[in-house]
Amino acid sequence: MTKRATVKGVGHYLPDRVVPNAEFEAIIDTSDEWIRSRSGIERRHFAAEGQMTSDLAIRAAQAALADAGLQAGDIDAIIVATSTPDLTFPSVATMVQAGLGMTSGFAFDVQAVCAGFVFALTNANALILSGQATRVLVIGAETFSRLMNWKDRGTCVLFGDGAGALVLEASEESGTNADRGILSTDLHSDGRFRDILYVNGGTSTGTTGHLVMEGKEVFRHAIEKLAETAHSALEKAGLSPEDVDWIVPHQANIRIIEGTAKRMQVPMDRVIVTVQDHGNTSAASIPLALSVGKARGQIKPGDLLVTEAIGGGLAWGSVVLRW
Ligand code: UT7
């Protein structure tokens, strides 16, 4: 028998305010047609004034716990993937811990920008496999609207706010790739590319700063690196793209999602796509897609999933799991 980190529950939360592309036409030189055709985005959600990343994370966590049929006290650890914490510290994860009324266990944040959820899942898997935790709440939560330069039309139309959460639980499985749970992980980063995607604030400036991106460059790296990491993760699990029921990609741009699927030779009807409704929600995009994909009736127990993401750092990676 082999210990695996299996999915017990999933949930998400999106702020009420929906912002269609047309709203940007009034403030910058852009059009609904440009945004749709270059990115696939039609609308995104923005958090209300005073609504923080931890608020979104708590709502997503509650939804995932309800889906799992568990209480906060059943959880040993919380990992929040975010690059938009309410405060520099304490972590959003400890705010979620308090918000859920959880007084035991431990909680911490992971910051790997848009790849954050893949990094958080990999950490949760390691905690479970090493016996340090039995049930881990893994959350991706972001309020990227707070990092936007509203004069930069190349970035401000692309991002949105939201949160998604998974409950992972240790279970004894057979040790083959037919098992449920996380089957393999594959992480990478390369700090030489810090200048193509970053936020120009922090302790060095004393301000939160704004997101700065060389879109074309990031696009080029994404197309190349995402298929590569997905292939590596599948290979580690002794699987191939034909075995994949669903690619659950980071939702940055429909053209990147299509390009990656094409390189993997997986047809688009086996890809979960939510970018049109959420925009790029950074670390929240994969758990949001998992939750929406399940709610739509696409993702079913036993399905083989590959998640893949890339973002600032650059940092990128992939997780193969059976739902
Ligand atoms: O999640 C983290 C990772 N991030 C990503 O994966 C994002 C990666 N990059 C992208 O998704 C794409 O590069 C963008 C959607 C950001 C841009 O698409 P593109 O096809 O690479 O366009 P571009 O940056 O080459 O811009 C083409 C033109 C430019 O005009 P000129 O120089 O050709 O006259 C831009 O100024 O489109 C212009 N443009 C816009 N026009 C209308 C840029 N933004 C806008 C806009 N509305 N919002």
Image (cartoon, grey):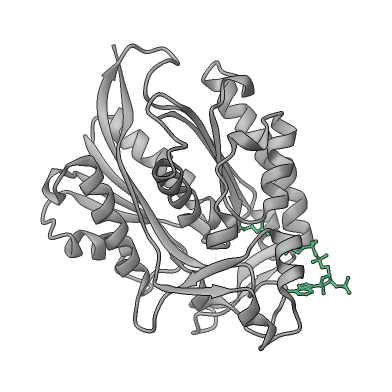
Based on the displayed image, in which of its 4 quarters is residue 51 positioned?
A: bottom left
Residue extending farthest to the front is 297
Quarter of the picture for ligand 1?
Answer: bottom right
Q: Nearer the viewer, residue 211 or 160?
A: 160
Residue at x-position 55% and y-position 21% = 236
Q: Is residue 140 above or below residue 128?
A: below
Q: Is residue 136 visible?
A: yes
Q: Quadrant of the C terminus?
A: top left
Is residue 307 shown left or right of residue 53? right
Is residue 216 shown left or right of residue 312? right
Q: Is residue 179 above or below residue 161?
A: above
State the image coordinates of residue 322 (x, y, percent, origin top left). 42, 27
State the image coordinates of residue 229 (x, y, percent, origin top left). 62, 35
Q: Quadrant of the N terminus?
A: top left
Is residue 128 shown left or right of residue 321? left
Residue at x-position 71% and y-position 72% = 32
Q: Nearer the viewer, residue 293 or 185?
A: 293
State the image coordinates of residue 122 (x, y, percent, origin top left). 42, 38
